[in-house]
Image: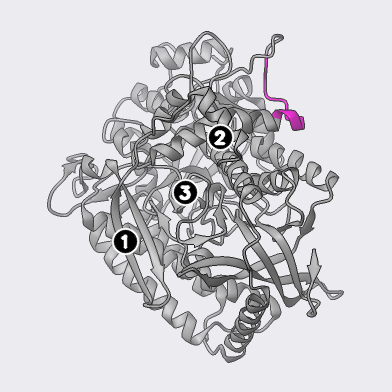
Amino acid sequence: MKTRNDSNAFMFDAIVLGSGAAGLNAALQLSLRGVRSVALVSEGLQMGTSINTGSDKQTYYKIGMSGKNPDSNYLMAQSLYDGFSMHGDIALVEASLSARAFLNLHSLGIRFPSDPYGQFAAYKTDHDPVGRASSVGPYTSREICRFLIEELKRREVKIFEGRLAVALLTLDENEKKRSAGLLALNMSETASGGKKLKFETFISKDLVFAVGGPGGLYKRSVYPHVHTGSIGLALMAGAGAQNLCESQFGMASTKFRWNVSGSYMQAVPSFLSVGKDGGDRREFLLDYFKSPERVCDMTFLKGYQWPFDSRKIPAGSSMIDILVHVETEIKGRRVFLDFKSNPHGFDAAKISDEARSYLMKSGALASSPVERLMAINPAAISLYMEHGINLFQDELGIAVCAQHNNGGLSGDTWWESPDLSHFYPVGEVNGSHGVYRPGGAALNAGQVGAFRAAEHISRKDNTSAFNADLALKIASDKIQELREWIAKSRNRRDWRSERSEFQDRMSSHAAHIRSESGLCAARDAAWEQFRRIKLEGHAIESEEDAAESLRNIQLCFAHAVYLDAISFAVESGVGSRGSAIVLSEKDGDQIDADLLKEWRIQNCNPLFLEQVLETKFSDGSAQIRHGWVPRRPIPESDLWFETLLKSISANVQ
């Protein structure tokens, strides 16, 4: 590390921004590969999505490594590629490095289940044709983070906590932009318990951008409150994005944010709708599914089919998500899972063979949902108990929430941005996934991306001139600009009001139920809000207000870009696909002649499944550009051993 003349300016060979599972591994791999000075910059090691989230059995997806079923890199790549709108070369890299990434975690001490012969046990997850999934329980990503943090500290990698990134630094190089570092606010605690904010400059030749998904964009979200995401910083800096229209949504608890997937549904709880005043309690799923047996079977299937899936309506389990949406968003009621009581008419002898067989093999043919859940997965109950919710006594409030962004920033096969050199988006902020992905593939993609970025940074020639002094000058000018914006802010609305506005807009128009007219109006309102914030700022009465106001700039910009991209996709005619349906006033299939007679759903247009939506902002013209490009196929690689051996000897990449 080098400290410049300004004590608030630091220089490193490589910086990792973000401390989730992907960012932590990127910092570790950079250190292991001999990059001389590495720093990790974070709001806090305990504040990311990875260390604060999970599910009933949080999954890590990797190549098959046990049993008699054959598997290969190409077979796994094909499974990823079969999710549509994903580039084949990226799929092959994610498959080829999955074993290395998984075994790296195992070598750090994470105890993935294995038999006495060293075979790692596996199971099927959603969109998984063969059974490649593994887990260490509800907190798989948390365990990954804890072991990686311990190793980084052991290796004495420099870690800056309490830093809020507020701008990325770029330079012009060879008619292209390159990354040069970032600006951050040091939010150190003062003696009075408030926040004392000061700007810091971090200059680096390479930047690994591991800031996670867009957690702060949706009102109804299962992202932890402490995670908002920073993709807007990269979009404003000119980094391109892809498939921003593709996200996952699913039912989650709201008091404590957690996905109610897997065993929570397989225990077959009852769904209750309650009026605002707490009265008029009723089981509402019978209104649509008509028979108790059908309600129980669809509830059980949600365990396997947890993310909302446009293909699983009107006859499938995703109708439950729509019915929950109708109760909460249209009727203004509240929905609860009740694990104390069986659904009306529950009879274990009459449920589907699949459900009965699963419960029987799990020793879970008990008399109530909470007893069945205890037999299937007692940790799922303990998890809520740790957060003050007793499923033996309490009903669990739920809603359909934003859960994961399958799209994000663009990266090549080394995870480097094609638009911003020396800039590597890894983890959820990298949009490597397509329309669908196997459950747990995101954890694998983040670990693989960390390996690829670190390897690329450590191998390439970094002897070319890097104008650190110019980067410092640009940083100084940007700091002055931000200070002036804070000083001149005259908006009567504070950052909370402004943030609530764009979060409401995203949940209303850019979640699992969309319409062309609604998106068009929302997109225009989004850009109007961003222009207002840039011009008028916020009502700022404290240093914390100033910090959150600066955070709002990139969040509001990101939500406008997302809405612009989603609107473009819907106007292009993609129809309903992935975890979103598109409603149409003119055509489409009617869901139900009685219950939802006004709902007509556009069909998926298969032509777009073979394409990727690219998005880029040009600060020079202040314009957003979108375009569809054909997805790249899975490549046929030359694996002749002697040829590859010669390339290593010749030091050819």
Q: Residue 379 location, x and y as percent? A: 67, 29
Q: Which residue is mark 2?
A: 647
Residue 598, which numbered label?
none
- Please state the extent of the stretch shown in magenta in the rendering: 106-114
User: In the picture, which quadrant includes the C terminus?
Assistant: top right
Q: CA distance from mark 2 to mark 1?
A: 39 Å
Question: Observer-nearest residue: 599 or 624?
Answer: 624
Q: Are marks 2 and 3 in contact (CB under 8 Å)?
A: no
Q: Which residue is mark 3?
A: 412
**Position above or below: 453 against 350:** below
Name the residue at 59% across, 37% down. 650
Mark 2 residue type: Ser
> Of discs 3 and 1, which sits in the foreground?
3
Name the residue at 37% across, 60% down. 615
Q: How many marks?
A: 3
Mark 3 residue type: Asp
Q: Which residue is mark 1?
A: 626
Tag 2: Cα neighbours inside 10 Å, few (<14), some, or many (≥20)?
Answer: few
In the rendered image, which quarter is residue 211 located in?
bottom right
Question: Observer-nearest residue: 127 or 53?
Answer: 127
Whether residue 291 is visible: yes
In the rendered image, which quarter is residue 13 located in?
bottom right
Mark 1 residue type: His
Q: CA distance from mark 3 to mark 1?
A: 18 Å
Pick whichever of labels 2 and 3 is earlier in the sequence. 3
* Residue 617 sits inside the magenta stretch: no
Pick whichever of labels 3 and 1 is earlier in the sequence. 3
> Of discs 2 and 3, which sits in the foreground?
2
Question: Observer-nearest residue: 211 or 500?
Answer: 211
Q: Residue 452 location, x and y as percent? A: 58, 43
